[in-house]
Image: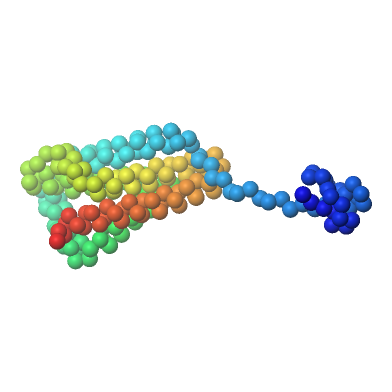
Amino acid sequence: MSYCPRCGIKLPEDARFCPNCGASIYRIVKPRAAEIHLTGSLKSRALIFLAVYILCISITLIGASARIERREADEIMKEMNKLENTIKSAGVQIIFGNNFIHALIMFIPAVGPCWGAYILYNTGRVFAAYSLIYNVDPTVLFLTIFIHPFAWMEYLAYTLAMSESLWVVYAALKRNFKNEIIIASVIIAICSVILLLAALIETALITPI
């Protein structure tokens, strides 16, 4: 209910001028709350996520199954032993920091998926080195890490990052870039929590009490 600011008469709801004195009526229109629109449907985003997750696993398996020389395997083992000692002394910060930086790069449009593929392939090479030295099937060795929840969580975060980088590109083409950046920011926060929990679990397994 509103009244004319000049003569005080009660005004109709949609009045632009006072029917009594003719004064102009200025109305304050409250802006609508900002709405965030998904670039794609939930179903399409779920399908892309699943496809990227399978691709991440496949790339790691390709790296694990690739031929590796004994000399390279020994070098990789030396680096892994150094990393394990660093983790024991520095704790969860090393694992979380390293994984989160990689995940952030994976969010970058176009560059992110390429970086992710490179990192996951090299992760597979680590399994290839272990399999050569300990004479274990690399595929079996790789699959055994999924006994632990941190492996699922790390691949979940990387998949979220790479799939979101694809959606950012698509959103830019569809002129929905601003909304997608907001969504990407939320997903980055989710990935940070996932990777932190994964790092805590992995550290506990490496450095048991």
Left or right of 119 in this view: 112 = right
Indicate the position of residue 151 as horizontal and vertical percent values: 24, 47
**Residue 27 seen in render:** yes
Given the current orientation, which residue lies at the most extreme right position? 21
Above or below 33: residue 90: below
Above or below 118: residue 8: below
Indicate the position of residue 144 as horizontal and vertical percent values: 16, 42
Query: Which residue is at 90% across, 47% downward?
Result: 19
123 vs 149, nearest the viewer: 149
Indicate the position of residue 102 as horizontal and vertical percent values: 33, 53
Query: Which residue is at 89% across, 56% downward?
Result: 7
Left or right of 159 in this view: 142 = left
Above or below 149: residue 85: below
Q: Quadrant of residue 197?
A: bottom left
Query: Which residue is at 42% across, 45% downward?
Result: 165
Quarter of the rendering occupied by the C terminus = bottom left
